[in-house]
Image (tube, grey):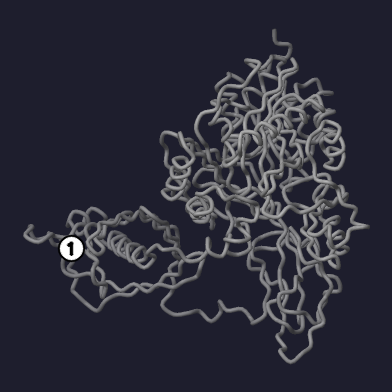
Amino acid sequence: MRSDVIHTLLVANRGEIACRIFRTCRDLGITTVAVYSDADADALHVREADLAVRLPGAAPADTYLRGDLVVAAARAAGADAVHPGYGFLSENAAFAAAVQDAGLVWVGPPVKAIELMASKTRAKELMTGAGVPLLAPVDPATAGPDDLPLLLKAAAGGGGRGMRIVRELDALPGELLAAAAEAASAFGDGEVFAEPYVERGRHVEVQVMADAHDTVWALGTRDCSLQRRHQKVIEEAPAPGLDEALRTRLHEAAVAAARAVGYRGAGTVEFLVSAEGRPYFLEMNTRLQVEHPVTEAVFGLDLVALQLRVAEGEPLPSPEPPQPSGHAVEARLYAEDPARDWQPQTGALLTLEVPEGPGLRLDTGYTGGDTIGVHYDPMIAKVIAHAPTRTEAVRLLARALERARVHGPVTNRDLLVRSLRHPDFAAARLDTGFYDRHLADLTAPGAGDPATAALAATLAEAVRGAEAVHGAEAVRGAETVRPTRPGGPAPARFGAWRNVPSQPQRKRYRSEPDGTEHEVAYRTPRTGVPEPYETPGTRVLAVTPDRVTLEVDGVTRHFAITAHADRVHVDAADASYTFTALPRFTDPATHTAPGSLLAPMPGTVVRLAEGLAAGVTVEAGQPLIWLEAMKMEHRILAPASGTLTALHAAPGHQVEVGALLAVVQEDPAATPVPVPVPEETA
């Protein structure tokens, strides 16, 4: 019999994970409560909740990381339970204790289990006693050439913060200082430890689910090796290419880890698997993982429902987990530009439409019309595909992403599609260095046809302009949107005006984000139907303001057109394009002085290079300014060797995109004197 029946649940989180938890609560008849910052006042998770409580402020430190405010919100809304989601306070033992002290049900593991696993160094000591395989720690003070390469990691957190790869002993002291400073900034704890860096290692994890009745499930493996900046991009279950003996060893080690800390609820035990197939314990995440949907798909489970069941005191449904079926792959759609050092992007998400169908799932915290802000993680959505085999699941996911309509900030959608279709991924040749090796190829100009897409955008705009002048009914009533095929009736004429054939019109576009320019020439003959000029092999079959059908070299192609201000989004069957309409003549005022360092995104200046001031000499490519935006740090590099003639940035400054941070005057004849700074940040 249940001891703690949950009627009203507060989710101490935001965005996608809050929406996902609310979905299960609706299925179970549980009232939902959202908390929100001022920046999230109109967010989807607030709109979907039954009740919502404001946390004044915008920054995470003032809102979602304030455990006292979250507990107060739960009590104010009449909640009887709190689910932490992932990130923010989800692995904070003090917060879990505060929830329980307030008489609320904590939908998570015991406080002691969180404490034991909170420090990676202490967790590894505990795992040694449990017989879980580990990498031998390395003392940085006595490290020698034979210990290289080394991996430095923050003891108190993850997500790539405070993590460094050291390949030269001379770099070790500086990297230790930089890693400790970043760890202290991100987690409030500057402890850093070192261990051997495993080249070409795979990130493999095991989902566990445990109850208070001595049952612990090992719910298969997941491969999360495709990462950028030590953060996952594509995940799948089960991890491909593992022999049965290795799978069994991973399952047994994960169960041993869970039992060693008296675990309850959903958790993940993460391992590094070497190229030779040897597993090493990395850490245990005492919460639900971002990638949990692939496990749900393969096992036919709702892990959130099981979390709630265990929190209410109920046992798991059976002593053994259900049998897995098929393969699932998840891709994280981020508002970021992989070709520009993964810079996060902000702005209005004008359209978000992902195809629906058997085997497809979308988890998101956004809808079209929402705004992606600067304060939080840039993940827009997770797209998940499940099919009988890995090949089918990968194909289904790649095609769903390719057909998705995502308009607004630059995203990693094209990178995801190319990654899923890369020969190494298809052959399951996976390791954490995948993007280090392949990023240049994956972000190079694609094999699409942007010139034809730009033509489609131009023809649609021409019809749109005619409708604006003469009215949609007049233009469409004249059948100007569909040319006459040979032998067909003559098109009707406009009742109020006559279009006299004239010189071709020209339209210029810039492709986003690569900056390639396209010029399109077209003319509008007496039929009133715009047609391409000097484009052999292309014929217009139909054109409206939002859809164009062209015959290109004998193949019929359809283009969906969406215009927003000076930007045009063109979605074709095999690719999507974003164009910015350009004026006929360049505005000289848009140019900036050579050597200007501009903020690539809105954010906060967190630090400057040591000794940086107007008048110092810098070297091309040298990091000068660190900008924090959307939970990541970004380096602003010197564009040339020379003298810093102006510095407008200071730690703590909030800057908008395009803000002038500094100016470097190039001096090729000068002997640059580098400003001492660490080489890596995030």
Q: Nearer the viewer, residue 673 or 519?
A: 673
Quadrant where the N terminus sits is top right
Label 1 environment density (alpha carbons within 10 Å; few <14, some 14–19, many ≥20): few
Image location of residue 325, percent across then percent down: 51, 29
Q: At 54% from the left edge and 55% from the top edge, which residue is drawn? A: 411
Q: At 68% from the left edge and 18% from the top edge, which residue is drawn? A: 6
Q: Nearer the viewer, residue 398 or 534?
A: 398
Quadrant where the C terminus sits is bottom right
Image location of residue 117, percent across then percent down: 82, 35
At label 1, which amino acid type do we have?
A: Ala
Outermost residue toward the right in this view: 141
Quadrant assignment, res 248: top right
Q: Which residue is mark 1?
A: 496
Quadrant assignment, res 611: bottom right
Height in image: 94 above or below 475?
A: above
How many numbered badges does the structure rendering display?
1
